[in-house]
């Protein structure tokens, strides 16, 4: 079974530029998550999708971050404009549904460096 | 607001040692607690999930315990191996809420 795919793996941009990340979840997984992991910290949930609807985006900085999940499959996360403090690893995860006991499968992440 | 801490932040041990990683959380009203492993440049892999009604879970050389009343969980690794070197994260989930992760313990097992 193919895992969660993310691209690009690494991205370096200057502050105030825009950047987009892509995630392809495991086939058949209805729930998709985007996390931000700053160096030395645990992942922080940014947004959770159930199919193509948003379930939780309470920690998403909506003035600069946006995310969509078209057709309930792939998802993109965009930052516009980027700030220095956005430097982090952005992890995508998926699960079959959104039950608390469902395992979340994580992708390898995209490491973003903002200069 | 739930807060999760992990002690120690980093640990280095010789191969073969038994070791304990600690996780503490501030709100004891949790639904479950999960331990993850993170290798450099890779995503997280789930190791053990303990539901609130359980006291412990075991998988191979790993044993995780949960004491909700004191807000603590421990991950015990028996007979550590160099392949166990990674960052170990605990995550706590409240009812109807998403995971809150700790900062992790970075483990190095020396051959």
Image (cartoon, coloured by chain):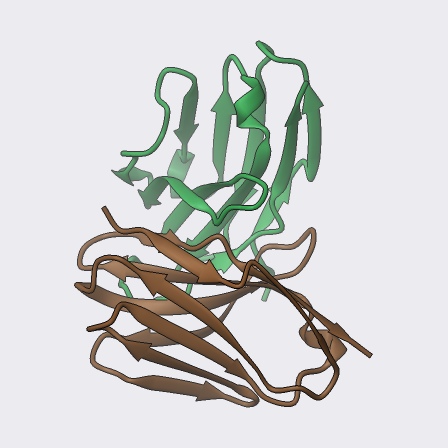
Chain colours: A green, B brown
Residue in view at x 53 percent, y 26 percent: A86
Q: Is residue A14 left or right of residue B95?
A: right
Q: In the rendered image of this protein, does residue A28 appear above or below residue A111?
A: below
Where is the C terminus of chain B found, in terms of image quarters? bottom right
Task: Work out whether residue B53 or residue A26 is closer to the camera in this orientation and state it.
Answer: B53
- Expressed as whole percent of the image width and height from the top left, the position of residue A62 reads 35, 21
Residue in view at x 73 percent, y 75 percent: B83
Task: Work out whether residue A32 or residue B39 is closer to the camera in this orientation and state it.
Answer: B39
Quadrant in the rendering for residue A14: top right
Q: In the rendered image of this protein, does residue A36 appear above or below residue A85?
A: below
Residue in view at x 41 percent, y 46 percent: A33
- Expressed as whole percent of the image width and height from the top left, the position of residue A83 reads 54, 17
Quadrant in the rendering for residue A72: top left
Residue in view at x 50 percent, y 50 percent: A25
Q: Tag count in the figure?
A: 0
Most extreme residue toward the top is A16
Asked if one can make out residue A96 in the rendered structure from this viewpoint, the answer is no
Quadrant in the rendering for residue A11: top right
- Expressed as whole percent of the image width and height from the top left, the position of residue A57 reads 30, 34
Asked if one can make out residue B100 in the rendered structure from this viewpoint, the answer is yes
Q: Is residue B77 left or right of residue B2?
A: right
Task: Work out whether residue A36 or residue A25 is closer to the camera in this orientation and state it.
Answer: A36
- Expressed as whole percent of the image width and height from the top left, the position of residue A88 reads 58, 35
């Amino acid at each position: 079974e193919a895992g969660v795919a993310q691209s690009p793996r690494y991205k370096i941009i200057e502050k105030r530029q825009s950047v987009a990340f892509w995630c392809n979840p495991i086939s058949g997984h209805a729930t998709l998550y985007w996390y931000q992991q700053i160096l030395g910290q645990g992942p922080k949930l940014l947004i959770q999708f159930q199919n193509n609807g948003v379930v939780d985006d309470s920690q998403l900085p909506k003035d600069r971050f946006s995310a969509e999940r078209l057709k309930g499959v792939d998802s993109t996360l965009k930052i516009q404009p980027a700030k220095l403090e956005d430097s982090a690893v952005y992890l995508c995860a998926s699960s079959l549904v959104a039950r608390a006991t469902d395992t979340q499968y994580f992708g390898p992440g995209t490491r973003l460096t903002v200069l | 607001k739930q807060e999760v801490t992990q002690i120690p932040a980093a640990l280095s041990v010789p191969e073969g040692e038994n070791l304990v990683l600690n996780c503490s959380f501030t709100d004891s009203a949790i639904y479950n607690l999960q331990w993850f492993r993170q290798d450099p440049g890779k995503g997280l892999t789930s190791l053990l999930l303990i539901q609130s009604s359980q006291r412990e879970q075991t998988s191979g050389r790993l044993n995780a315990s949960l004491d909700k009343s004191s807000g603590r969980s421990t991950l015990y690794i028996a007979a550590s191996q160099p392949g166990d070197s990674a960052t170990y994260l605990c995550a706590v989930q409240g009812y109807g809420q998403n995971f809150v992760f700790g900062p992790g313990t970075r483990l190095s097992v020396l051959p």
